[in-house]
Image (cartoon, rainbow, N blue to C red):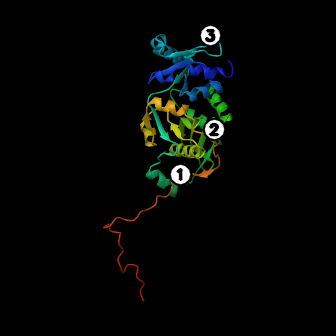
């Protein structure tokens, strides 16, 4: 497979017409170039954990493949099982602005007043991957996929944010950048809300570098609580194709998590509020 083959491979796939709630294609491989080409086309991989899962994929998609609704992509090896690797592009996609992540009032107060957390970016990518893979069923983040993602990280396309409590990694998130769009793959926490802080941190760093949009891939109450809203897949594909200008490197420095929850300015109290007017003698100095 040549270096340009992955781009040509996915360019021939009409993702806009792919099933909304099923795989768009099966096959290909997890080489870093293939992965990057897929994310640029609005696809992400879900490898089968074992032969049983691969057989289930084949049984479930047999009619759609026969009808031409789902593509079978060639792999690097002749005779390889294409159903061992599925490519998804759900419709709708939960999207939010890179500067629009919500932490909530309670967590913001904790960050300002009690939680001594710090964050970094791209400092423990492998550790974040391993933590995200722990205990997940089905185990889609396979060792092969982890190695491919580490390859993307070395190329500067995959990023992580880490949340630290002292020297302990207590939360994290990782995702793949395609221009000004960052697709969030997975997150984890070992302290309540640490994953939420990791998402806010990675989003803030991405926005500061020129990024504009976050994709949470799968809709859920959790991603909606962060500020994501389901949008038509067509809008997401258009954002990927848009030339939004260059995105610079992420700031990877160790930064206080409290910066993500700045103090809210207090406006004047409304007329008639019990504290709007002080008692004329309350602060008078006795002589």
Give the structural element (helix, strand or loop) at label 3. Answer: loop
Can you tell which quarter of the image residue 85 is in?
A: top right
Res 20 quadrant in image: top left
Q: Secondary structure at mark 1?
A: helix
Using the image as rendered, state which of residue 246 and residue 232 is in the foreground. Answer: 246
**Residues under labels 1 and 2: Cα distance?**
21 Å
* Left or right placement of residue 160 versus residue 109 in this view: right
Label 2: which secondary element? helix
Q: Residue 15 at x, y = what percent?
A: 50, 23
Residue at horizontal 47 percent and vertical 37 percent from the top: 95
Q: Are marks 3 and 1 in contact (CB under 8 Å)?
A: no
Residue 260's label in the rendered image is 1
**Location of residue 116 in the rendering, given as x and y in whole percent from the top left corner:** 56, 54
Q: Bin the neighbour count of mark 1 within 10 Å (Cα to Cα): few under 14, some 14-19, many 20 and up.
A: some
Residue 108 picture location, percent across and down: 48, 53
Residue 191 shows up from this direction: no
CB contact under 8 Å: marks 1 and 2: no
Quarter occupied by the C terminus: bottom left
> How many marks on residues?
3
Above or below, 136 against 23 in this view is below
The mark that comes first in sequence, 2 or 3, is 3
Mark 3 burial class by Cα count in 10 Å: few <14, some 14-19, many 20+:
few
User: Measuring 65% from the left and 16% from the top, which residue is drawn there?
Assistant: 76
* Distance from the alpha carbon under mark 3 to that under mark 1: 51 Å
Sequence-first disc among 1 and 2: 2
Q: For the N terminus, which image quadrant?
A: top right
Q: Is residue 193 left or right of residue 151?
A: left
Mark in front: 1 vs 2: 1
Tag shown at residue 125? 2
- Label annotation for residue 79: 3
Q: Residue 68: x percent and y percent? A: 48, 13
Can you say whether 153 is above or below 193 in the image?
A: above
């Amino acid at each position: 497979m040549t270096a340009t083959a992955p781009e040509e491979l996915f360019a021939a796939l009409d993702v806009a017409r792919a099933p909304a709630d099923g795989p768009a294609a099966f096959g290909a491989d997890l080489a870093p170039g293939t992965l990057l080409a897929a994310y640029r086309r609005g696809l992400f991989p879900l490898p089968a954990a074992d032969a049983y899962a691969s057989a289930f994929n084949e049984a479930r998609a047999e009619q759609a493949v026969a009808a031409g609704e789902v593509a079978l992509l060639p792999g690097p090896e002749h005779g390889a099982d294409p159903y061992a690797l599925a490519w998804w592009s759900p419709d709708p996609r939960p999207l939010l602005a890179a500067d629009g992540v919500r932490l909530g009032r309670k967590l913001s107060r904790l960050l300002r007043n009690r939680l001594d957390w710090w964050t970094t970016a791209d400092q423990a990518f492998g550790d974040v991957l391993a933590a995200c893979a722990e205990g997940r069923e089905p185990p889609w983040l396979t060792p092969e996929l982890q190695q491919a993602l580490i390859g993307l990280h070395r190329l500067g396309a995959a990023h992580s944010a880490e949340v630290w409590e002292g020297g302990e990694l207590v939360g994290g998130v990782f995702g793949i950048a395609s221009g000004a769009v960052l697709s969030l793959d997975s997150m984890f926490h070992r302290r309540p809300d640490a994953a939420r802080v990791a998402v806010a941190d990675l989003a803030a760093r991405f926005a500061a570098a020129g990024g504009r949009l976050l994709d949470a891939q799968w809709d859920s109450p959790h991603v909606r609580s962060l500020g994501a809203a389901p949008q038509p897949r067509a809008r997401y594909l258009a954002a990927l194709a848009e030339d939004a200008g260059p995105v610079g490197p992420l700031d990877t420095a160790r930064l206080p998590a409290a910066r993500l929850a700045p103090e809210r300015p207090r406006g004047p109290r409304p007329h008639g509020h019990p504290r709007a007017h002080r008692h004329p003698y309350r602060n008078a100095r006795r002589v």
